[in-house]
Amino acid sequence: MIKASDLSNIAREAYDLGAGAPEQNPRLAQVRANLPLEVAWDIGRWMFTTGRSRPVDVHKTRGTTYNVNDMLVLWRSSGVLERLT
């Protein structure tokens, strides 16, 4: 079972890589094989590219909606996210 701490850690790893290529993720195969981890990866990249702060608290709320640093974020597809609140 995926824990919230796992999602937060993956999101931080993606954020810390910044503009680096996705291939730099040492756990790329693990992330792409597990949807919640893939979403966490996308959240970290999205937060970096949109100039937001480093993800601290990432957890799934309902469906493909995630709570990220007190924001509600909808994951639409790989790499496509939308802030709801």
Image (spheres, helix red, strand yellow):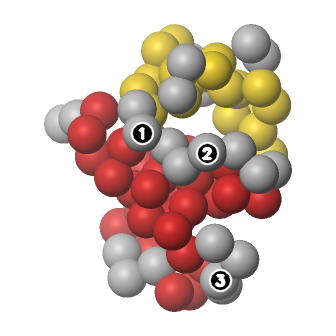
Query: In percent of the image, x 50 and y 43: which residue is there?
Result: 55
The residue identified by callout 2 is 53
Q: Quadrant of residue 59?
A: top left
The residue identified by callout 3 is 20
Three-letter amino acid code at disc 1? Val
Q: Are marks 1 and 2 in contact (CB under 8 Å)?
A: yes
Query: In percent of the image, x 77 and y 51: which residue is there?
Result: 51
Whether residue 79 is visible to the viewer of this picture, yes or no, is: no
**Residues at marks 1 and 2, CA–CA distance in whole angstroms:** 9 Å
Badge 3: how crowded within 10 Å, few (<14), some, or many (20+)? few
7 versus 66 height, above or below = below
Q: Answer with mark 3 or mark 2, whichever residue precedes in sequence.
A: 3
Percent x, y for residue 54?
54, 49
In this view of the protein, which residue sits in the foreground, 2 or 84?
84
Hey, which residue is sitting farthest left in the picture?
1
The residue identified by callout 1 is 56
Badge 1: how crowded within 10 Å, few (<14), some, or many (20+)? some
Percent x, y for residue 8?
37, 43
Secondary structure of residue under mark 1: loop
13 versus 26 height, above or below = above
Three-letter amino acid code at disc 2? Ser
Q: Answer with mark 1 or mark 3, whichever residue precedes in sequence.
A: 3
Quadrant (top left, top right, bottom left, bottom right) of the C terminus: top right
**Residues at marks 1 and 3, CA–CA distance in whole angstroms:** 20 Å
Query: In percent of the image, x 28 and y 46: which residue is there?
Result: 6
